[in-house]
Image (spheres, grey):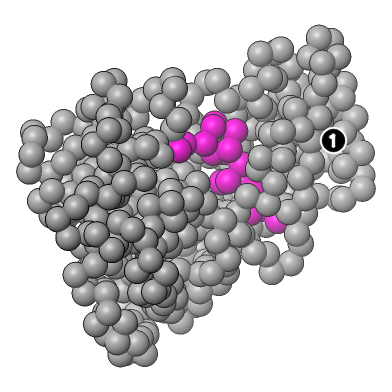
Amino acid sequence: MTSISVLKQREKQIYQKGSQPFEMTCETKSLAGAVSQRACVFCGSRVVLYPIADALHLIHGPIGCASYTWDIRGAQSSGPELHRMSFSTDLSETDIIYGGEKKLKKALLELIEKYSPKAAFIYCTCIVGIIGDDVDAVCRQVEKETNIPVIAVHSEGFKGTKKDGYKAACDALFSLIERNKAPRVTIPDSINILGEFNIGGETWIIKKYYEAMGVKVVSVITGDGRVDEVMQARNAALNVVQCSGSVTHLAKQMEKEYGIPFIRVSYFGIEDTSDALYQVAVHFKKTPEILKKTRELIKKEVKAIVLSLETMKKDLEGKKAAIYVGGAFKAFSLIKALKTLGMEVVLAGSQTGTKEDYEVLRQMCNEGTVILDDSNPLELAKYSVEKDADLFIGGVKERPIAYKMGIGFCDHNHERKIPLVGFEGMVNFAKEVHGTVTSPIWDLVPRRQNRIGKEGAI
């Protein structure tokens, strides 16, 4: 792997603990030609809003954009599934020359009449930003004619990175919340769960915990989401933010406009799940019964899974893992969960981390760990092999990298269908890690057969 060099312009986006001063460059546009693993602005907005199941999601742009993001999350719904249909205005050369506003309005009116959605989100793609369609004006016209919220999502691809898509989605969500004109009444001991997308039914697991604690969930943004529930979000007493990279902007908007405080949590792993539930219980200290129920819940749940985890830990002790995920906050929980299984993280990276995030990663990781920002396939392959990783945790784009390197893989991205949150999710995660790391297939990989004293090769 020594033949693969790092692009000079990316050198400060790579840090190895113990070998150099900590100085990470991040939150920048991807280097041209680096083949970033990031998605575009439009994709960033789409993954946040997608799980709202009773809304119409219309992509204003070429058909390829709709195809790229069709059914992009493993987000389940307990009712309507309008979100799983991919609608597009399918802009052609003629539309690009003469404009696509008429086509957009016609498509909106037809779809709203046919499917009767509670609201409509219109995603602006790269080409729309270039030709200058006034999507906001079309949305106002259609909203007036149909009497449902019709909201433009300004996610034109050339305006930034995937993180800018998150902000565009948050702006659209806040616009939807603002449409609730009823007097605001704060519901006691209530929360909104932000940044939870019901991958494999995870929302239902988390809501079950809060119900057992005696905490009311006003809305989940956006897992198993409903338009009416999102519009009620301003009545909650607390915002609990899970995927901080995607929805913190919305939490800050709601804090500024409605005075709703927010906390950052994670529901992945025993340690972070317990901490998340305790944080909420402590916040509602005026109702001491909540804290009592929380203690009982955590004790019961941990007792139910600890034996199973200890059994798998015997086979995983001392194994090495590489992590590359969308947001760095997720990496924090993964490091703790892997430590519970006796594993060491030798590579940790994210697509959208901040300097503060990477400083936390540096403190959490052992000497020699490689920390990456906005990486690419060659870098991920290079360091995974050099660090002799037994496991790679990432998303659908990282799976081929791991398998080509002869490394076990665990999908922790939004396409998966298995829940990994909470206490039962920790068992699912451990089973998946154990199954792939201990698979006998890896004994046949040449790099594994010659791992002592020799460097692997692609």
Rendered location of residue 434, percent (x, y): 37, 75
Q: Quadrant of residue 422?
A: bottom left
What count of labels does the image hold? 1
In the image, residue 104 sits, relative to residue 88, either above or below, namely: above
Q: Quadrant of the C terminus?
A: top left
The residue that appears at 64% across and 32% down in the rendered structure is 153
Res 360 visible: no
**Residue 322 at x, y = what percent?**
30, 54
Q: Amino acid at mark 1?
A: Leu
Residue 451 occupies quadrant: bottom left
Foreground pick, 206 / 326: 326
Q: Is residue 10 above or below residue 173?
A: above
| Residue occupying image coordinates x 12% and y 44% | 17
Q: Position of residue 83 (x, y in %)?
A: 72, 52
Look at the image and tell me in which quarter the N terminus lies. Answer: top left
Q: Is residue 273 left or right of residue 109?
A: left
| Residue in the foreground of this view, choosing between 375 and 340 | 375
- Residue 369 within the segment the image draws in magenta: no
Read off the magenta span: 37-54
* Residue located at (7% from left, 43% from top): 18
In front of the other: 37 or 54: 37
Q: Secondary structure at mark 1?
A: helix
Point out the residue furthest to the top here: 97
Residue 110 position, x and y percent, is 92, 39
Q: Find disc 1 in the rendering and name its residue.
A: 108
